[in-house]
Image: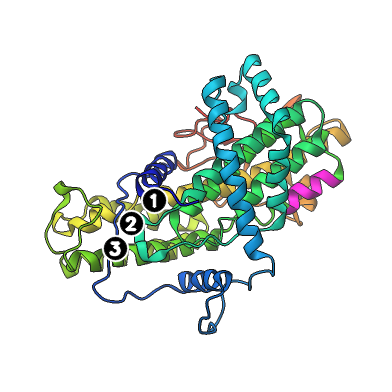
Amino acid sequence: MRKSVKDVVVALVVVAMLAGLVGVSLVVAAEEEPVAKPASIEAYERLVAELEGRPMEPPAGPIFKPLPADAKDIVEGYDRLFERMQPLVDVFETQAGVDLGEPPHKWTEKDRAKIAEFLETNEDLLSEMRRMADRGAPIYPLDFSEGFAMLLPHLAQSRKCSRVLRASAVLKGTNGDCAGSVEDIIAGMKLGDALAREPILISQLVRMAIYGIMSSAVQNSFDGSDLSPELTRRLMDQLARADRRDDFAEAFAGEMYFGMKAFAALRAGDRSGLPAESDFGPPEEADEKAYVEILSRIGSAARLPYYEAATEVTQITSDIENMPETLAYSRQLLPALGRTCEAQARHEATIDLMQIGLLVEQYKARTGSYPDTLDEVASSLGGSVPVDPFSGKGYRYRPLGTVFVLYSISHNRIDDGGTHDYMKGDIVWRGEQEK
């Protein structure tokens, strides 16, 4: 699974751009002195040691459950899957002129035919994806000592697998095979879950991106009225475990650890990975202190619902933008933290809208009309309807006879009336998936 640093850095930059992140520097951090590890990284390293058969001191309070007996087989199974999948997909996309990253509503009939042929030819590959997803999350042997330059090839490969599963789910669902479609969608979501334990920000962002891919699969595969009670239950059970806000918040501790290692390397004269124009000299103590303070603040804010954290997130974003030039390395190392918190809130809203939207569609199938209010589907959501993470109030809902409108006000925190726009407008159930 290991690739060159150049390959992995390019992949990470692409993922960061897709997530709306800019200004993230990738630095090899050679330590001047030991930097305290957050508990999440220590716990993950214990799991890697357990996987590799290396003894370690027992943890004072383990964060993660011990590995299953077949953990090594699971990791090797994912390695084999990725090694086989990547060239097959790359060759198909190049020769067929089809990009599986394109949202399904943009596929032409010719695209659909090519995709269907590829999936039929490689059904055993899809079976292996579903089988590995069911076996549980692997523990990738991440090397945290490499800091921001840590090799993470599995992230791009997991994302690519989810796109293949989405394609399969959409074609099955539109051909009436809802059971097969749901199976592929859940497998894709489990690929996202497999990254949840990784205490680094980029892994959490890819996890969210994979769920976004599978949400578009749901919205392009079937209507809620097409699902049996059993298929609905399976989807709801998966989605009930999907928000993972604590895992997202913990990733800022990992980000801080990498940044502190980078500062230690800079003090030791190691500028590996930094461009020549970024030579600001030895970092000042105030620079590192500002970096740690900002990440501590964002880590605390990230544990809150976004509507409670938004004011603090906005202030943190402003503080970063207005940092004096004397804090040069903090200005360079800090990612676009506000956008990452928005990404987590968007992820939570996407999950909620998926559940609510499917239930509203099923209500119409049972009764002949859409519910007057969302309270009428609350019993299927554990007794209450979740609130919009961007407002702290209910999701906007209007039954309009033969259709309905359901949406989140999204990160601009303005009700745009259900106008779907990824960057400016609302997040709309069954709105156009990407613009």
Would you identify the image quadrant in which residue 111 lies? Answer: top right
**In the foreground, 13 or 413:** 13
Residue appearing at x 52%, y 57% in the figure = 305
What amino acid type should be assigned to the residue bearing mark 2?
A: Ile
What amino acid type should be assigned to the residue bearing mark 3?
A: Ala
Q: Main secondary structure of the magenta part?
A: helix
Q: Nearer the viewer, mark 3 or mark 2?
A: 3
Q: Secondary structure at mark 1?
A: helix
Task: Give the x, y percent position of residue 261.
Answer: 30, 67
- Does label 2 or label 1 sit earlier along the sequence? 2
Query: Which residue range is magenta in the image?
Result: 230-237
Apparent side of residue 180 relative to residue 310 in the rendered image (left or right):
right
Residue marked by disc 2: 316
Apparent side of residue 240 relative to residue 370 in the rendered image (left or right):
left
Q: Cβ–Cβ below 8 Å for labels 2 and 1?
A: yes
Q: Is residue 201 magenta?
A: no
Number of residue marks: 3
Q: Is residue 236 magenta?
A: yes
What amino acid type should be assigned to the residue bearing mark 1?
A: Gly
Task: Give the x, y percent position of residue 206.
Answer: 51, 48
Residue marked by disc 1: 338
- Does label 1 or label 3 sit earlier along the sequence? 3
